[in-house]
Amino acid sequence: MSEFFLELFSEEIPSSLQKNLREDLLSNFNKLFREKFIRFKKSSSFSTPNRLLILFEGLPKQLVLKSEDIKGPNINAPEIALEGFIRSNKISNKDIFKKKTEKGDFYFFKTESKKLNTHELLEELIPLMLQKIQWKKSMKWGEFDLNWGRPLKSILAIFDKKKLNFNFHHLYSSNLTFIDKEFEEKKKKFSYFKEYINFFKKLNIIIDQKQRKDLIEKKINEISKKKNIKIENNPKLIEEVVDLTDQPNVIICEFDRKFLNIPKEILINTMQYHQKYFPTFDKKGNITNEFLVVTNKQDKKGFIKLGNERVVEARLSDAEFFWQKDKSQNLVKRVSKLKSMNYFKGLGTYFDKVQRMRKLGGVLSDELLISKEKVELSASICKVDLVSELVGEFPELQGIMGGYFAEEQGFDKDISLAISEQYLPTGPNSKVPKKPYSVAISLADKIDTLVGFFGINQKPTSSKDPFALRRLASGIIKTVIENKKDFKLRDLISYCSSLYLDQELKFDNNFLQKELSDFLMDRLKFYMKEEKIRNDIIQASIDSLNLDQLVLIFNKAKSLNKIISKPNGIDLISSYKRASNILDSELKNKKIELSNTTDPGIFKTEFEKNLFKKINELKKYFSSINKDENFEQTLAYLAESKKEVFDFFDNVIVNEEDPFIKKNRLELIQMLCKTFDNYVNFSLIDSHQ
């Protein structure tokens, strides 16, 4: 058994492209080998900033392709179809035979078994696979016609310790690669992967990204323990620095303590997002003036440490200047500057947006029983930080900086917090606003955005969502459910649409209300699926309720999902299904009209009376419950009806000869099902799951 490995050496590939590239390339080769019946024991992919590698172990030197029957057109197909089949497979009429299948009679031909040389097959296939690589961003260079993420310099390809010979655009494969990425004069020949790995290991170059990650995390933990500091868990940043290095080392640096007086978000943003550093915190969670840097070399003379400290000091000096300047500029007076800042074509300016948010916030304040004036003031100034120089430099901090500016200028704490939390939640794992003023501003912002973009038909498609409208809609769902407070969302959507019209901003979408309501309900379904609620329970819960009852829908579904496989759940579903199955069977294709009541005066048995009594008890319960309904208790009451239901069906003949008795009994069963359906539409529950 033999080994195949391929190295693609290029200029530095950004970390954002590396992971997908190595995974996609390996996946494509795995798929190709399966299609070509090339067996292998193990496959791996590796990358450094300059090197992309794939490795396959345990490949055969030769492949034996067994003969197989290749299906052609149906024997009744036009003659031209058969001619095309013969021509495309390079065969003659004498090679064709007829064969009966489940779908009819077809033409076939049998291929011959043959042996293929794996070495030659790889030389043929590798260029084709490389051509299929899809880049999010690619470039051309020189006079070459190759599109690649960064200029590709060499291709090393080895199978069974022998080089593979092929060309890919202007490059020819070899068994050589560059030793030093900075000085490309030196090359070295390799025959197998272990030799390759061991050689670079002696140069302290780690080809395996998993080993680099382990090393970086180990060094970070060692420094943290030694210095008694904490590093926030940041898997994304770890992955990024792993792909930025091939000789990783971790050093500790520091900046002037005076910068600790500016908001910590500026410090974190500067270090994490702009410089790929790791900020540190003390045991109380306060940010310190020390930070960790993952370098690509050992820093024996301290020059790397000094250089990184100078870079961060320069950026923080700019940030401090902007902070001192922006925090003193009156937020209320700067609202008018939003008039010159376009929001989106067809949706007015940011000034228009905050005016709509003011009015939406006013409506929400009534539902939340909070000060309308404070909500309207929060909405008026919530976007002013967009015209600040600080947010211009750090756009990721919009909203957060507005909250700090409001706090510095003495605004009420509720207002400052509402401004800083207006964009929450930012993702599935993000926290949601909990304070009433924050909830009002967050919902007003998201509803206004969704109504606007749906109004001008800038809706998400199955593959694209350029304005992150799904995230915004999910944010509404998450905020409403986690605050356990339903809102009249349908009225808010309608009112927001009218606010756009009041500003003479007309919409093209005549189905805005329905489309946006359906969109939000879809996001509710998605949210519940993420909560591991069964799909049939989701459908049953949504069926009889609407967008204004998100919390109710979720709580009912969650409670039912919790007990569905337990004795109570089994009893409940079996009772309902036994009743509904008989009812459906009797009503199917028969002209029986049932009323919504039953006549207890013509009951013949105690079992009918007992079931009727139980139904009335359940109906009385449902009429007495309010917003504080205990859903688990409701389900328990429904499950308790199993005895009366089963006693009835075990002892009473529903299909009675007397049509009046039969109709009365069917009406009794219908009453039972409708009473159960006060909770959810149980007919949509799959009893076989």
Image (cartoon, grey):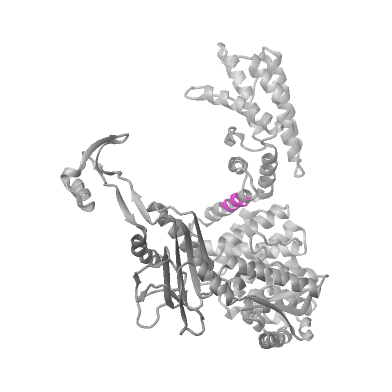
Q: Position of residue 35 (x, y in %)?
A: 39, 52
Q: Nearer the viewer, residue 505 or 24?
A: 24
Res. 624 visible in picture: yes
Q: Position of residue 535 (x, y in %)?
A: 58, 43
Q: Nearer the viewer, residue 241 or 249?
A: 249
Q: Is residue 523 magenta?
A: yes
Q: Position of residue 430 (x, y in %)?
A: 68, 62
Res. 464 visible in picture: no
Left or right, residue 203 beside residue 644: left
Q: Position of residue 520 (x, y in %)?
A: 58, 54
Q: Is residue 288 magenta?
A: no
| As drawn, 443 above or below 628 | below
Q: Nearer the viewer, residue 142 or 616?
A: 142
Quarter-wise, where is residue 415 in the image? bottom right
| As drawn, 122 above or below 602 | below
Q: Chief secondary structure of the magenta span?
A: helix
Total marks shown come to: 0
Question: Which residue is drawn at the image coordinates 67% and 14% (left, top)?
Answer: 603
The N terminus, quarter of image: bottom left
The C terminus, quarter of image: top right
Q: Which span of residues is magenta-colored?
A: 522-527
| As drawn, 229 above or below 632 | below
Quarter-wise, where is residue 102 in the image? top left
Question: Which residue is drawn at the image coordinates 59% and 61% (left, top)?
Answer: 471
Question: Which residue is drawn at the image coordinates 73% and 59% (left, top)?
Answer: 366
